[in-house]
Amino acid sequence: MTEPSAPLFVGLSAEGPGGIQRFNRRIITGLGEIGAAPRCVMLNDAAIAGRRARLFRAVMGAARRAPTLLLGHVNLLPIAAGYRALNSVGRVILFAHGIEVWGDPTYRRVRRWEPAAMRALVDHVAVVSDFSRGRMAAAFGVAPDRFHLFPNAVDLPPLEAGVRPTPTILAVARLGAGEREKRVDDLIRALPIVAASVPAARLTIIGDGPLRAELAGLAATLGASGRVDLPGSVDDHVLAQAYADARVFALPSTKEGFGIVYLEAWARGVPVVAARGGAPAEMIADGIDGLSIPPGDISALAAALIALLVDPEAAARMGAAGRAKVERYYSAQAFSANLRRLLER
């Protein structure tokens, strides 16, 4: 098999804890592993410091020599026009992460020129899920054959197999003012129903932002404050311990473009509960490695949580199946292999 030629990778940032930053670092690492170490230009790197003119000059300086331009975000689409002007035979591949390409005006509007530019300038769109592919195709008018399914990946920590002794539910999410569609409040609303069947049930919600105070207030209103832990943002050690203590991971979100937190739970042997109709439900084999429920259905959510909390052996089996799925489809090795296929397409 021939080694792919070294591409030019342009992104917003590869520094920091954010999901896109981690994705960009994984792309850079994966390219090196498959023998295609790229020239990388990141908008927020110290050398660029957010200066778009400097970014454009850096990109154009490398454009003629790069057979492929990898764009890390839809906001960088204008870079493709300059690349095409200097390299008419090169390919352009855009990475699409989720909600930024859904055409949702509450998050990011599709600019009037973008659909035509997308069709004219981009050869392939590497998109994280079928759900996001459908939303992007409708928003930008991109033909189905332009897409390449390119899911994210997680690192695999050592697995603590076996039954989790405490009936703890874990959720990990940003709690910003614009994150209500994560529906973390549904977990608190379901908790009194769960507690009627599982008296020792507890809920830990890791994440910070304005919604954290609202969630604490909701728990108090429902008389569930003693069962709900809201520690805010935590370090990696505390987060790992929270996964180790959890019998089930639950996030009934309706706005996930992919849902890497579900993979992080599976990687640690924890079964997941998610809402149907979105990207997370694509990954779940219902009843095998997790459970999916109708979005917004508190009774169904409570029933799913109870089913896993009262049967720790079944929860452990589902968690093990989730771990096996991550090893096969969502590991660093699977990510690099898919990246090679993308470049050879």
Image (tube, helix red, strand yellow):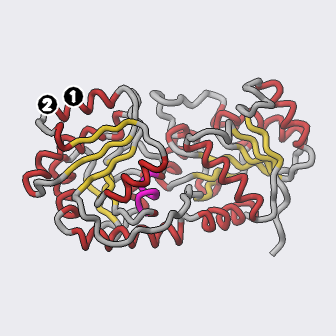
Give amino acid for label 1.
Gly
Q: Is residue 271 left or right of residue 186?
A: right
- What's the magenta region? 261-266
Between 230 and 344, the one nearer to me in the picture? 230
Kindly state the secondary structure of the residue where label 2 is placed.
helix
Q: Is residue 259 visible?
A: no
Between 116 and 172, the one nearer to me in the picture? 172
Residue 316 in picture, x, y percent from top left: 31, 70
Say which mark, if any, is on residue 217: 1
Q: Quadrant of the C terminus?
A: bottom right
Q: Quadrant of the N terminus?
A: bottom right
Q: How many marks?
A: 2
Mark 2 Cα within 10 Å, few/some/many (few <14, many 20+)?
Answer: few
Please report contact status of discs 1 and 2: CB closer than 8 Å, yes or no: yes
Q: Residue at x 40, y 33 (%)?
A: 208
Residue 85 on the magenta span: no
Residue 170 in picture, x, y percent from top left: 32, 51
- From the viewer's perspective, is residue 107 above or below residue 25? above
What whole-number distance in Å separates the C-alpha atoms at marks 1 and 2? 6 Å
Q: Residue at x 68, y 42 (%)?
A: 14
Between 89 and 19, the one nearer to me in the picture? 19
Kindly state the secondary structure of the residue where label 1 is placed.
helix
Q: Main secondary structure of the magenta part?
A: helix
Mark 1 Cα within 10 Å, few/some/many (few <14, many 20+)?
Answer: some
Residue 263 on the magenta span: yes
Say which mark, if any, is on residue 221: 2
Q: Is residue 299 visible?
A: yes
Give amino acid for label 2.
Thr
